[in-house]
Amino acid sequence: MAHFVINGGHRLEGSVTIGGAKNAAVAIIPAVILAGESCVVENLPQIEDVRILEQILRHMGADVDFTPDGAMRVDPKGINTNTVTFDMVSRLRASYYLLGAMLGRYGHAEIALPGGCSIGQRPIDQHIKGMRALGADVVIERGVVKAHAKKLVGAEIYLDVVSVGATINIMLAAVGAQGQTIISNAAKEPHVVDVANFLNMMGASVKGAGTDVIRILGGRKLHGCTYAIIPDQIEAGTFMIAAAATHGDVVINNVIPTHLEAISAKLMESGAQVIEGDDGRDFFIRVSSNSRARAVNIKTLPYPGFPTDLQQPMMAYLSTAQGNSFVVENIFEDRFNHVAELQRMGANITLNARTAMIEGVAQLSGAPLFATDLRAGAALIVAALAAEGQSQVHNIGYIDRGYEFFEQKLRALGADIKRVE
Ligand code: EPZ
């Protein structure tokens, strides 16, 4: 199996360009089904999750190809099935968006329950609650969610937990429902707004995305469109943390700085320098550090709080900070699988339920490491880049799911990383 070999201790220096947002892409590609016409999706990240969705749509009968500049053109007219089987979705958590999109378009969908990262239980009860409120019969049988509606009708839906997936999935189904849907306690993540913008570009009426109340006026006639996905907040945050962890100096291009405020604030609190700028074409963020980090406390929260997806890379960074950092994971109950690996590199971390106490050590040392999920993989790479000596990072299939050209981008910044097949 492929793995990364990393010789740590090199400062990251130079500039890197961020790709399109994974978590927007995995919702926008299925959302094309709602248009019923061909759509072109630009600024897609070149990652495994996108390739899996491309295969699923082709398998369902959609026509998928790529424009000369790399945008994906999806024509959903040929879709000839309402069923997506486990073999197709087993590697893709976000396959649940096919449920909302197909229910909204055809009134019928049967989707095997998703696979993806193991970071906790990850129920989908709020997705189901929303679809039932719109009038769908939803049952789970033998690992398949079956949703069926003679007619979807807009409804008022209060989410019991702030869920990105449920907010987006209900938005997708509600676009196909007659009348108004109101989602309260909605997630406000940048990719929720991006999906709403895409739906509006297709002719839908989605208002309030980015606040905790979203109103959808469903039943409008939709059409094809061309849409460019926003830059990936988490990829950008990962490079910001890696720059600080290696005492580097990196300009991160193609970012939306407001999406990164929580990360910038915490990096600055730890003593790193973070500068936002505009080069006339793109916004950029420059992160540099020339001294040992100071300990900081982190609590993960829904946006605009500190993102759970950066909790793991941040812990790798804080492993060598001066003093004790407390990290509280409020979103997923089991997102600490990276801790055992960091401990093998010499990190001093104590876990107590959802809280990790990190007593900073002067230096981590390289070791054989195993990624257990996507962001755990990113955390191990950050740790290995900053560590003394050589590390091998295994299970990099997780990392390929969500980071495009990761090792090439890191190598261009001066990292000593290579993929060994
Ligand atoms: C999305 O997952 C992202 N995935 C995750 O990114 C991200 O970590 C997460 O949002 C939080 O920001 C995609 O966008 C594809 P949630 P999602 O529904 O939608 C509970 C990454 O590394 N919950 O916002 O599955 C749930 O258990 C990945 O890129 C319910 O109880 O997350 C969790 O505690 C991993 N019932 C909380 O809500 C539900 O029906 C938030 O989950 C749904 C969720």
Image (cartoon, rainbow, N blue to C red):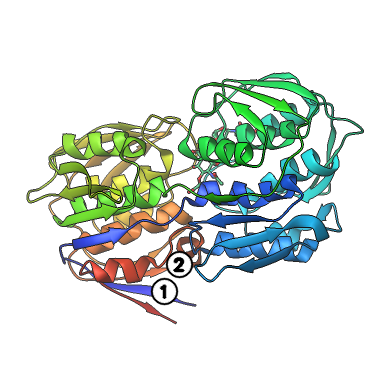
Percent from the top left, x then y, of residue 280?
25, 49
Q: Is residue 319 visible?
A: no
Q: Earlier in the sequence, mark 1 or mark 2?
A: 1
Callout 2 amino acid? Ile
Q: Nearer the viewer, residue 257 or 84?
A: 257
**Residue 152: percent from the left, percent from the top?**
83, 29
Residue at the image position 54 percent from the left and 36 percent from the top: 192
Q: Reply above or below: 296 against 375.
A: above
Q: Is residue 240 visible?
A: yes
Amino acid carrying label 1: it is His
Q: Residue farthest to the right?
A: 150
C-alpha distance separating marks 1 and 2: 6 Å
Residue 166 quadrant: top right
Mark 1, residues whose alpha carbon is within 10 Å: few (<14), some, or many (≥20)?
some
User: Pointer 2: what residue?
Assistant: 396
Query: Residue 351 appears at what percent x and percent y?
Result: 36, 39
In the rendered image, the quadrant that contains the C terminus is bottom left
Q: Is mark 1 within 8 Å of ligand 1?
A: no
Answer with left or right where residue 352 lies relative to residue 12: right
Residue in the picture at 52% in, 40% down: 194
Q: Residue at x 67, y 46 (%)?
A: 31
Q: Residue furthest bottom?
A: 421
Q: Is residue 141 above or below residue 301?
A: below
- Could you say which is closer to the camera, residue 283 or residue 236? 283
Q: Are marks 1 and 2 in contact (CB under 8 Å)?
A: yes
Q: How far across and down, in percent of the image, does residue 281 sit?
A: 30, 51
Which residue is disc 1 drawn over? 3
